[in-house]
Every structure is written in structure tokens, then in C-alpha cells.
Image (cartoon, helix red, strand yellow):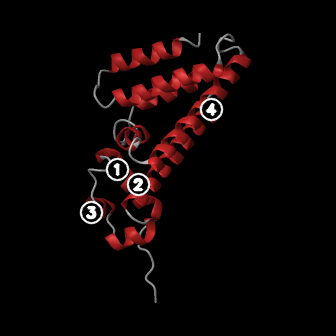
Amino acid sequence: MARSKEFEINEVLDKAMHLFWTQGYEKTSMQDLVEFMGIHRRSIYDTFGDKHALFVKALERYEAKQTSKIKFLTQNQKSIKLVLREMFESTIRKEGEPIGCFMVNSGVELGVLDPEISSLVNESYTRTEEFLTTLIQTGQQTGEIKKDLDPVVTAYFLMNNWLGLRTLVKTTSDQRKLTSIIDMSLSILD
């Protein structure tokens, strides 16, 4: 008779995500994962596959959680500018998460070496740029954002600044500096 799993998949996947996010792919060993996830090595292989497959699943889980957070923002904010500000400010205000961005970290560490990871990161960036474009267009229709801005190019600009901020938070805790970057980035919308 087969033994039932004694763990909740998303709970242990979140633990793997946290460990990969903190240490990176290369520095994280299977033994680290076994110890941090609190499950047997065999259970990891049976449930998720090898280390690379687990990493991909953790990255996909991260993307889903980030998308959910952004959707929540848009549902609870009436102002497009406030949604954009909250996106940027959430980057410098980490509550219980590792600093930086798991997606950015993964792209930097593995993007050139691993086509699958590169594709996942690029797809995530593209979805975010499309989301930003839609927000900008909506803001232009309501008069909240200047109409003479090209929504696509502005989305690229904001995405680039947001990614830079998500990298910079790993090396500085100067809130004044980080906030001034957000202010300058969003000032183009006025």
C-alpha cells in the first residue's frame, strides 16, 4: 500500500522558493533543500523531480504569487498612479521575504546559462510590461497620466527602473535614496 504524502505541496514549495531566493540555484544543494523543506530527498524527487525541476516550480510559484499581489493592488486602488507607486514601494518594503527579487536573481544567475530559466524570466518580464502598458493606457483615458506618453515605451522605462530598484535593494538600505528613485521614476507620468 502506498504511503500518503505527509506534507502540503505548496507549503514545502514555498520553503524551496525561499531557500533558492536567498541562496541562489548553484549555492543550494539537495541536502540544503531536504533540511530546509523538512521532507525526505525521495519525496522531493517523487513530487517535484530533480533540483532543476524543483527550481523551475519554485520560480513559477513565485511568479504566481507576485501576479496575485499585483492583481490585488489593482482591485483595491482607484488611482493608477497609486497602484504604480505601491508596486515600486513594495520592492523596498519586504515583510518576511528575502530582499531583492527571486525572478531578477534567477535571471542574473542563470539567464545566459539556462534557456528554460531565461525563457521563464523573459515571459515574466513581458507580462509585467504588458500589465504596465495597460495601466498607463487606463491612466491616460482617465486623465491621470499624460496623453503624450507612448504607453509601451513608458512601460519599458518603468519596468527597467523597477528591475533596477529590485536589484539595488540588495546592496543599500538607504530609504531616502530608494524613495527618491521611485519619485523620479514616476514623475514622468505627470
Of the image marks 3 and 2, the number of the one nearer the N terminus: 3
Residue closest to the far right: 141
Q: Which residue is mark 2?
A: 55
Question: For the residue marked with disc 1, what is the amino acid?
Answer: Phe
Look at discs 3 and 2 and give the one toward the viewer. Answer: 2
* Residue 112 in view in this figure: yes
C-alpha gap between disc 1 and disc 2: 7 Å
Which residue is identified by label 1?
20
User: Which secondary structure lies at badge 2?
Assistant: helix
Mark 1 falls on what kind of element? Answer: helix
Q: Which residue is mark 4?
A: 130
Foreground label between 3 and 4: 4
Q: Earlier in the sequence, mark 1 or mark 2?
A: 1
Marks 3 and 2, how far apart in space? 16 Å
Farthest bottom residue in view: 1
- Residue in the picture at 44% in, 65% down: 48
> At 46% across and 47% down in the image, what residue appears?
115
- Give the alpha-carbon distance from disc 2 to disc 4, as whole Å: 25 Å
Q: Is residue 37 left or right of residue 78?
A: left
Q: Earlier in the sequence, mark 4 or mark 1?
A: 1
The residue where tag 3 is placed is 35
Q: Name the amino acid, label 4.
A: Glu
Do the CB atoms of the residues marked 1 and 2 lie less than 8 Å apart? yes
User: Distance from label 3 to label 4 (Cα)?
Assistant: 39 Å
